[in-house]
Amino acid sequence: MNSNLLIIIAAQAIFYGTPLFFAALGGVFTERSGVLNLGVEGMMLVGGVSAAWSSQHIEGPAWFTVLGSLLVAMFAASLVAAVHAFLCVTLKANQTVAGLSITIFAGAVGLSSYLANVWHVAERQVDRPIRKLDVLGMADTPIAGPLLFNHTILTYVSWVMCAVATWYLFRTKIGLQLRAVGESPQTADAIGISVVKYRYLHTMLGGSLAGLGGAFYSLAIVPTWVDGMTKGAGWIAIALVIFGFWRPDLTLLGAYLFGALQALGIQLKSRSVGIPGDLLDAIPFVMTIIVLVLVSTRFAHKRIGAPASLGVPYEREER
Amino acid sequence: MSGEGAGRWPAPFAFPQTLSTSVIWRADNGGHEGATMTNTAVHMTGVVKRFPGVVANDGVEFDVRKGEVHALLGENGAGKSTLSNILTGLYRPDEGTIELDGVPVSFASPKAALDAGIGMVHQHFRLVQPFTVAENVVLGNPQTPFTINAGDVNKQVAELALRFDMAVDPAARIWQLSVGEQQRVEILKVLHRGAQVLILDEPTAVLTPIEAEALFRTLRTMTAEGRTVIFISHKLDEVMSVSDRITVLRGGRTVGTVETKSTSARELASMMVGRSVEFNRVVRGRPGNPRDVVLSVQGVNGNDDRGRQALHNVNITVGRGEIVGVAGVAGNGQRELAEVIAGMRPATDGSVSVGGNTLPNGKARAAIAGGLAHVPEDRLHTGLAAGMSVEDNMALKTYRTPLLSRFGMLRRNAMTEQATELVTRYDVKTPDTATPVRLLSGGNVQKVLLSREFSTNPLVLVAASPTRGLDVGAIETVRNRLVEAADAGVGILLISEDLEEIMSLADRITVMYEGRIVADIPAANASREQIGMLMGGATLENAQ
Amino acid sequence: MKSPVRLERRLHQPKQLNWAIPLVSLLGALVVGALVLLATGKNPIDVYWRMLDRGFLSERALTGTLRTATPLAFTGLCATAAFRLGVINIGGEGQLYMGAVGASLVGLQMGGTAPVGVTIVVMVLAGMLFGAMYAGFVGMLRAQFNTSEIITSLMMNYLAGILLNYLIFNSTSYWRDPRSFGFPSGKPLEKRDFWPAYDVLGISIPFGLVLAALFAFVLWVIYKRSRLGFEVEVIADSPRAARYVGIRTKWTIIAVTAMSGALAGAGGASQVGDFAHYLDAKGLQLNGFGYTGIVVAALARLNPIGALFVAVLLGGLTNAGYSLQGPDFPSGLVGTLQGLILFCAVAGEILTKYRIRSNASAVTA
């Protein structure tokens, strides 16, 4: 039963979708504050290499090493995000160019690769990878087993995070203020809310989540460090933010959808089925374009669109 | 010396210095310091505020009693906005004092003013469009709890709205609301913050008459509770109907404060615009001919940027060599009118003809080609491309003509020649023609605009606020050029908030109020008070 | 929280900034890069010298550099053309791929039957056409629906890459070499149809680079001297002024975006005609020429002629990176330095618009 193709794909969808979700959730926070972050790929890779290195150097029980590695990954990525925030918020630079420069700087042929080289990270396997758990001993139960009880700890964390993020955004005062900053920084500023503070904090938070996603690649999926191992997952995460209409719950679903497509592609290839895997690969991107066009129309824009100030540097009007 | 303690002892047992009547009085009034009138909500005296080149407030006296609706009346530039900005903490006065409830205060920021109980409802709303009414109201209020329960918050806001007789749905999203409803949200915001003094800046500018009535009822409910309302306006009839007292500002000074019951629209208008002084009407070289029509606006209806109707059945004609003035306070549809005529904005009804030819609706190029020139209010970002050179801007309307371009390529030499010639002819002070226009002074910017418009040999020139913000010398130059052009046969539609300008330059004066032309009279027959009243919404008969 | 300094809008933009900023950005990046190298135990002087040597000085260096510079020049011009209007087209990557697809289609069809000059012209035109249409779609979405061209052009990059993979690896398409079973690859052009290279003082200059130089000049002329360029400047300066004068902004956006795509498409044609001589799906996707082109445009401050020089500079940097690849030379250094250059260019750009002022004496309102 559990080797049924559908079950396998569903379980794999959750697995591959988890890092996408983390990075995209980070993107949701950042974009909700009005900052466009195109440097996600770079931040994921920095997270990935930092996690791999930490995993090889932190002594102690397995859970301690894993936790430490994840924290280091998140911290390192948030530093990169701080640079992005500095460029975008303080220097009011063009956010697209700033984000691209971060990706080039930290990306596959950039800092992440450089550090991997200098720290000799790729030479050893990660010997404390994040393994899938057997929750409550129910990993083998039909259907529910692989779908609910056989995931890595990070997947379960991601479910909790989704709920917490939704609560944070829509039911707390800080979340309200964050959304106000993203929709109308002039109004927020006039009320006394610090646009700068919110943007910095949430850009760095977004970066740290991207780093967490990247760590998933080097500690769970592969698990070892390979240059550029996220293979564009960061860009997909950017698309996911739009696809999920800037809401954590829809983003989680979208991440699993994209993960399913990835899993489907792998399974089909291994069974030499004729459907071109390329078609499947293309679906997420085509769908994102469609969603983006729909969201830009005046009708949708008012109801479900991007935060109004996304990508626009905020300049307080001098009187 | 604290008042509370002294107030508790019966008079014979109190210390000698507390036997004065002021102590007993203080006890009645809950321990206020100082022997001032405690039914004064706001007292501003000797307030001076200077900006580069202008004294916006020049010793203003402003006194508002608790629980009244007090109107602040004045023309554009009289100093009303500056005064209210000082009261709400946006500006700090250079001189003078402000007292709230008899206590001197000084606000370091708008937040401080809000904390002190002064709330302002601006003309341009500051609302977050996708949020609900309730979310906008509680946003930024320090007392809002950490977790927001939509149900509780909605109930809170609904109760507040009910208390002040305002109909609003707390769960509605701002973009779904009409302008009147959005304004109610702005009012709820300040009430929620506990504002005791509310300042409303031209609140009925965006309301329909029915919505205005509802607003006035709400204001009455507020004052019945003891709150104070300051109502900034230029509309005489409203001010007469809703306020208890009126303070008129002119030229940065207080002209006077009157009881509404004992004044009239005529008296107010005359306070606003000043005594009928015999000002200098300009001497025209050649009078215009109203019968040789060069611009005809017929039955034009138009909408503003928000989609609301801004122009109602506008009819104007301008004859060859005539200067027709359009007087009115800003915000009554003047910008939309200029844009419709210039083809920048499509009219929803009616037509515009230049030189006898009807122009296609909403096509700027056709209007330009048809002989229409337009000097817009926004010089640097609409009439000109601020970052581009003088030369480029001089060619902005003619770059497609054979003189300046061939086979899609610009003839740069011809452009430079044209620019140099115009700069010399109109005496534009600029280092060279390659200088970006934003570096020029205000007067020279306007000269560039004017010279370019005139260089197209137009039949009609629509000039909106042509001398606003310019120094005396530049003002004279611009006015001379306009007269010169009119003498040469150009029909000029002069849209201006500066009544003096219109009265000195125009052959015929029309007045715009709420998107309608309410009068069209020869300048020789017009008086200042009359025009002032028309600008404030009076009808023609009442203004005689 | 009051910061000690504030940024104040500049009124003047001194002309020296035009070349001073890129220069300072470059130096700044080199300094920071040196710090990074030192921090990780490498000798910056040694590394930089070797890069200079392999990039520009040693025997075959310049040939390799120009080879790498050629696509960068095209994608740099692509980004320049669009950014000047304010359209952030980051789809140069995908537009280059599509240009390669179009050019190789046509080149293979011609199959050596026509004089090489004709073939080249047709290949270039096909490349430009495919690139223009691919980009024009993005422009149309922006003009008509106000959809963000940033995200759409990015998505299109991925779709173009998927197309390349499909054509070469996952199908038996016209482009695929039927003889390559073990490892699929593209069908090669006839030897006749290879684009020429010119030998000048021992350096081999690819035809594509000459073409790019020509395009740079043409783009410069368009922006400085033509009606279209004038209108673009007005729109970029003030959309309201464009409306005031009656400029058709929507059409301009589509036209300029298409033009920008055509330039990247020509770069794709050059990749096929000059270098690979077949549709190299793997190689094209590996290099990221489109994204680096954005760095080129930013550093050249959107000047087409400047873009040429910057392309050579960055080409040298990249080329040095390739040839120094090995245990001794850290692999990610090239990307890191490029990123640093871009950071500094971005930061430097701010200085053209703002001046740094101390807040010590500021009087608050």
Image (spheres, rainbow, N blue to C red):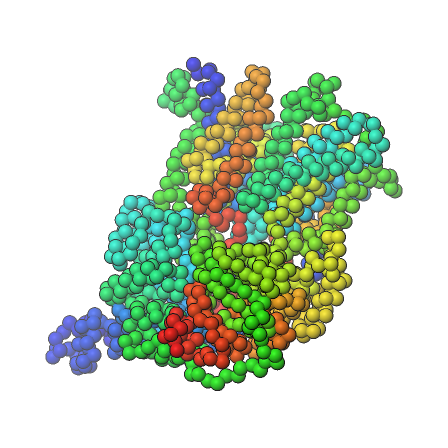
Q: Is residue B235 left or right of residue B401?
A: left
On screen, C236 above or below B283?
A: above
- Residue at 31 percent across and 54 percent down: it is B143
Residue B135 in sight from this viewpoint: no
Q: Residue B343, percent across and down?
A: 56, 58
Give the image location of residue A74, x and y in percent: 50, 39
Residue B174 screen position, x and y as percent: 39, 50
The one nearer the camera, A35 or B271, is B271
User: Along the horizontal axis of the image, is B522 left or right of B139?
Assistant: right
User: Which residue is at 39% across, 76% downward?
Assistant: B543
Relative height, residue A21 to residue B543 (above, below): above
- Where, quadrant-wise, is the C terminus of chain B in this rendering? bottom left
Query: Which residue ends up furthest to the right in the rendered image?
Result: C201
**Farthest residue toward the top?**
A1
Q: Is residue B286 above or below residue B298?
A: below
Q: Nearer the viewer, residue A158 or B367?
A: B367
Q: Quadrant of residue A105?
A: top right
